[in-house]
Amino acid sequence: MEAIVTKTGTEENSWGGGDRPLNAGYGKMMIWFFIVSDALTFSGFLASYGFSRFKFLDSWPIADQVFTHIPFVHGNYPMYYVAFMTFILIFSSVTMVLAVDAGHHMKKNKVILYLFLTIIGGAIFVGSQAWEWGTFIKGSYGAVETKGGKILQFLDTDGKRVAIGDFAIPIATEREDHLENEGIWYESEVARTSFSLEEVKAGFLANESYLIRTQYLDEHGERIVLSREESIAKLESDGKLIVEGANLKHNEYGTPLFADFFFFITGFHGFHVFSGVIFNLIIFFNVIIGTYQRRGHYEMVEKVALYWHFVDLVWVFVFTVFYLI
Amino acid sequence: MADHNLAIFRGLLKFKSNETKIWGVFILLSLITFVEVAFGITKPEFLTSHRFLSLKYLNWIFITLTLVKAYYITWDFMHMRDENSSFNRMVVWTAVFLICFLVFILLIEGDYVFDVYVENYVKFNF
């Protein structure tokens, strides 16, 4: 450890470099300052999410209606899976702090065990996040986007969501894929949805009890459902294209901004979790080969633990902002 | 770092060892998460129908519980409780002040843009 320490020549003063005036090692202090700056980055993202949400306060998607899936299970289960993910991350924080505690007592085998559990927890979380993204991108019911970029969703007789694939009436068309060598070369084929707007319109007219739900919210925060006449008029006059799932431009759940922020913020957080897992892996192998045991202290585990807890801390806020509020 | 401050709730609850304190804090955080999820799924009527500073009571509860969780993660998992108070303030006060400022400015501005959309002559109704 002493090999790379440079001396200032003023070690006798309390701020001269020889002392630890704040009673924290240099590395630990710097990881705290990094955490402060990273916290500001994340708060910038979340605050800009808040800005956009306040800007479109009367038409923002309701999280309960967006994230409703659990792996391997059909049906409508809002919140449960993301609650599980939160729990996993908190638990991996617990095993991490237990590893730090074992490190203080120089118990190498316990550090190895707890670090291993932390890595497993982190991997489960990243996997869950990937699944959540996949589900969100794939979409579940499909919707119609209007000329103004607003979303119209379809409800059946009981007021439940109905997928466009379940009621659209197939119409035989002769639309062919545009190929670069058979037309204007700089125009490329747009993504084809499984049903065209005309097919969905025909299906909607044929099912006389179906209604349209807009993305606007009433004064109770519920989304406004149009009457049958209004639904038909809206679909006929404003319907522009079919949206299935979500990407950065179109989003079947509501405003595209919601999808943009979702991808950006959870993506950035997921990247932090991923790099945290990598750091954990590195020190995990260092612990196994006994680097810190020989060094005489496990401060490196403590530093990585600080980063890992910070990732958990950020998730607590992301969870609240995206899924609860 | 051998001596940990083992009391939480301002000394109301004192743990015997650092390890039991970790498990105690874990139970507390799990309970808070459980309450949050329960509120998020049931959405009680009396909490969603009233507002304070244009936010529903329910959302104030979520924000408060989140801050409580953040406090215990920072203070007990990240051991901020055991650091020097000057170091603690250097980290926490800086972040809290700047984040409050940022959130305040951006939310006020977002609300203003919303008002412009609602009250202006240009209508976004297609």
Image (cartoon, rainbow, N blue to C red):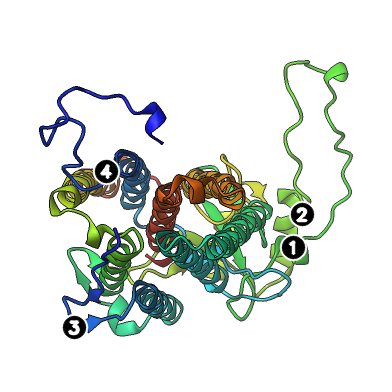
**Same subunit under labels 2 and 1?**
yes
Q: Subunit of mark 3?
A: B
Of the residues tagged 4 and 1, which is closer to the observer?
4
- Label pair 2/1, CB-CB below 8 angstroms: yes
Instruction: Provide the residue designation for mark 4.
Output: B113
What kind of element bears circle 4? helix
The answer to whether tags 4 and 1 share a subunit is no
Q: Quadrant of residue A84?
A: bottom right
The quadrant where residue A127 appears: bottom right
- The residue beneath circle 2 is A199
- Residue A149's spot in the image, x, y percent? 52, 44
The answer to whether mark 4 and mark 1 are in CB contact below 8 A is no
Q: Viewed as shown, does residue A171 lie left or right of B84?
A: right
Residue placed at 50% from the left, 70% from the top? A87
Q: Which residue appears at 58% of the width and 44% of the height?
A: A282
Residue under label 3, please give it: B12
Residue A211 as seen in the image, left or right of residue A57:
right
**Mark 1 crowdedness (10 Å alpha carbons): few <14, some 14-19, many ≥20:** some
Quadrant of the image for the N terminus of chain B? bottom left
Identify the residue at horizontal 54%, vertical 64% (top origin): A114
The residue that disc 1 covers is A203
Question: Dividing the picture into quarters, in which one does residue B34 lie?
Answer: bottom left
Task: Please name the amino acid that badge 2 sits on.
Answer: Glu
Three-letter amino acid code at the position of disc 1: Gly
At label 3, the amino acid type is: Leu
Foreground residue, A227 or A282? Answer: A282
Q: Which SS class for mark 1?
A: helix
Whole-Å distance between the Cαs marked 3 and 2? 66 Å
Is residue A255 found left or right of B2 in the rendered image? right
A4 and B122: which one is in front?
Answer: A4
Q: Residues within 10 Å of mark 4 (few under 14, many from 20)?
A: some
Up-down relation of residue A26 to residue A276 (above or below): above
